[in-house]
């Protein structure tokens, strides 16, 4: 009954490969996010989707392509992986109504290591 | 420019004692939302407490409470009666409005000693 679930949890891959991380939320939320946590544990937003539409795209290399087939799913595809892409990627979701500033709930993270 | 600043990279506390984590933020908005998240070694991001800027009353959740000083743009977290399970990285976060991104501070590592 996990609220925000991501797969895979761990991923080790070689430079130059293409990989995807999948995310699903069963909270009925209409907004989903991808955050990246680097080796210094700094967390930064990458993308945000509201009802399948992209609303935040934070200066992320175009090798990263999010896809939201429906409002319960937000996948992240990464092309031509580089060493610097090694990080923990968090999917998150929230239910937003005007003026609410609702809490964002996070998945368990996907630990990507590029070798 | 850094919106959220946590000036303490690490704080140590003995079991049953109290520790306070500091957080300051920068904003020109009058309405916004503040959060503390806990990240244990499992890396799971767990919401600890949240505060709406329009509320003057400080939020509390069991042993966790905040001191929200809007004019000073300060949002500290107090952990009372610390337990070994409180050992984790704690992140302060700011959210401007609905659909706004959550902006995090650099985190404070809390170490709990028996």
Image: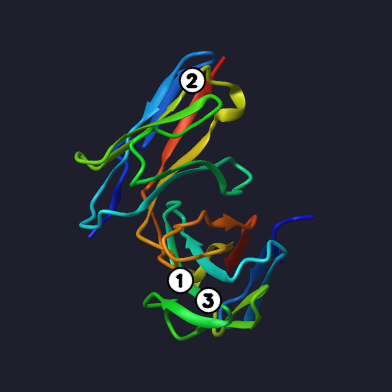
Of all residues shown, which one is farthest toward the right?
A1
Query: Does residue A91 appear left or right of residue B24 in this picture?
Result: right
Circle 3 residue: A49
> Which disc, if any, is residue B81?
none
Instruction: Left or right? Give the position of B80 relative to A3.
Output: left
Which residue is label 1 attached to? A46
Judging from the image, what secondary structure is the residue with disc 1 in?
strand
In the foreground, A102 or B22: A102
State whether discs 2 and 3 lie on one chain.
no
Q: Secondary structure at mark 2?
A: loop
Q: Of tags 3 and 1, which is closer to the observer? A: 3
Position of A70 compared to B73: left or right?
right
Question: Considering depth in this image, is A21 or A82 the residue closer to the camera?
Answer: A21
Q: Are marks 2 and 3 in contact (CB under 8 Å)?
A: no
Residue beneath disc 2: B80
Instruction: Please tell me which residue is depicted at 37% across the width and 33% down the height of the picture.
Output: B57
Across and down, in percent, residue B1 comes to 22, 60
């Amino acid at each position: 009954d996990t609220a925000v679930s991501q797969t895979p949890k761990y991923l080790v891959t070689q430079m130059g490969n293409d990989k995807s991380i999948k995310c699903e939320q069963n909270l009925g939320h209409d907004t989903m996010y991808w955050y990246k946590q680097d080796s210094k544990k700094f967390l930064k937003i990458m993308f945000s989707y509201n009802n399948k539409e992209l609303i935040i795209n934070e200066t992320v290399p175009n090798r990263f392509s999010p896809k939201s087939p429906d409002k319960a799913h937000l996948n992240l595809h990464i092309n031509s992986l580089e060493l610097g892409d090694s990080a923990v990627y968090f999917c998150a979701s929230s239910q937003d109504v005007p003026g609410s500033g609702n809490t964002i709930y996070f998945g368990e993270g996907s630990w990507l290591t590029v070798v | 420019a850094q919106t959220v600043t946590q000036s303490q990279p690490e704080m140590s506390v003995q079991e049953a004692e109290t520790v306070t984590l500091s957080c300051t933020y920068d904003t020109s908005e009058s309405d916004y939302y503040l959060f503390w998240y806990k990240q244990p070694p499992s890396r799971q991001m767990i919401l600890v407490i949240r505060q709406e800027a329009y509320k003057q009353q400080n939020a509390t959740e069991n042993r966790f409470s905040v001191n929200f000083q809007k004019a000073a743009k300060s949002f500290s977290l107090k952990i009372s009666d610390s337990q070994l399970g409180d050992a984790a990285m704690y992140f302060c976060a700011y959210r401007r409005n609905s659909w706004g991104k959550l902006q995090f501070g650099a985190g404070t590592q809390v170490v709990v000693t028996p």
